[in-house]
Image (spheres, grey):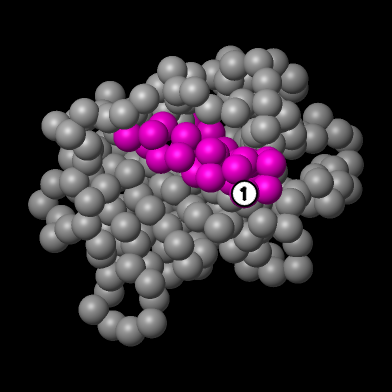
């Protein structure tokens, strides 16, 4: 489904005037509806390319409200759902069906067809479960979706947590954050992305988004080092920034 020209987001590149870090592609949408549609258009294109090239589309998805709107838009596209392998970027340690679980909302948002790989957060031995999930991950993800918290966290890589320094595991279990522990992909897992796609909405994300665009390592999100990254953001998240 093509996107009308007037609905397409403005695209620009943003880099730290310095040196070797590749610029992050920033695409600005006027409102939440346009953000969801243009992000869905991007996912659909990546999915078709991956399936045409090797038969499967490996897609890792974060939680939060914003991606569910994107999936709602994506359902209107003709995409090869049965060739999707959908992985979780992070998940709360909570019972099956709990409304705080990312999986609960992910399953509600997806149509029939995709092969969903849930994080095993209900296991008694969470560290062993994390290791098993790591073994399920593909050598490369065609696309990883990331969100952004106003405190600069992404996935469940949160300020001050020991998981930020994990380099020998692809999946780890965090300490308590906002009352809950979580399972999350680590930085080495995020580096497996062919493409990282950020989805950012809201005025409260302005400061954190600027730091992401500058690849500022003082916040967890700024430490994501995948070389190819695109940010889809609504105008309220970027207003008064130089991009």
Q: Which residues are magenta?
A: 38-65
- Tell me where residue 10 appears, x and y as whole percent: 18, 46
Does the rendering let one see residue 206? no
Quarter assignment of residue 99? top right
For the point 22% across and 57% down, the residue is 12
- Tell me where residue 145 appears, x and y as whole percent: 50, 44
- Tell me where residue 59 appears, x and y as whole percent: 60, 41
For the point 65% across and 16% down, the residue is 112
* Residue farthest bottom in this picture: 19
Quarter assignment of residue 177? top right
Main secondary structure of the magenta stretch = helix
For the point 53% across and 45% down, the residue is 49
Counting the numbered discs, the total is 1
Q: What residue sits right under mark 1 in the picture?
A: 53
For the point 81% across and 46% down, the residue is 136
Does the rendering let one see residue 24? yes
């Amino acid at each position: 489904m093509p996107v009308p020209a007037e609905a397409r987001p403005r695209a620009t590149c943003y880099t730290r005037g310095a040196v070797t870090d590749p610029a992050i592609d920033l695409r600005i949408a006027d409102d939440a509806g346009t953000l969801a549609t243009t992000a869905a258009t991007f996912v659909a294109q990546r999915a078709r390319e991956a399936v045409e090239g090797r038969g499967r589309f490996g897609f890792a998805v974060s939680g939060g409200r914003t991606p569910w709107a994107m999936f709602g838009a994506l359902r209107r596209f003709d995409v090869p759902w049965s060739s999707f392998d959908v992985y979780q970027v992070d998940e709360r340690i909570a019972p099956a069906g709990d409304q705080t679980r990312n999986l609960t909302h992910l399953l509600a948002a997806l149509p029939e067809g995709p092969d969903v790989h849930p994080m095993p957060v209900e296991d008694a031995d969470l560290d062993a479960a994390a290791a098993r999930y790591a073994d399920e991950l593909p050598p490369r993800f065609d696309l990883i979706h990331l969100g952004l918290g106003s405190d600069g966290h992404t996935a469940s890589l949160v300020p001050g947590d020991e998981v930020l320094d994990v380099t020998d595991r692809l999946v780890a279990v965090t300490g308590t954050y906002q009352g809950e522990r979580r399972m999350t992909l680590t930085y080495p897992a995020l580096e497996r992305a062919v493409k990282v796609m950020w989805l950012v909405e809201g005025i409260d994300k302005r400061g954190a988004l600027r730091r992401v665009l500058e690849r500022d390592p003082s916040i967890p999100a700024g430490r994501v080092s995948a070389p190819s990254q695109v940010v889809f953001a609504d105008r309220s998240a970027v207003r008064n920034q130089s991009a």
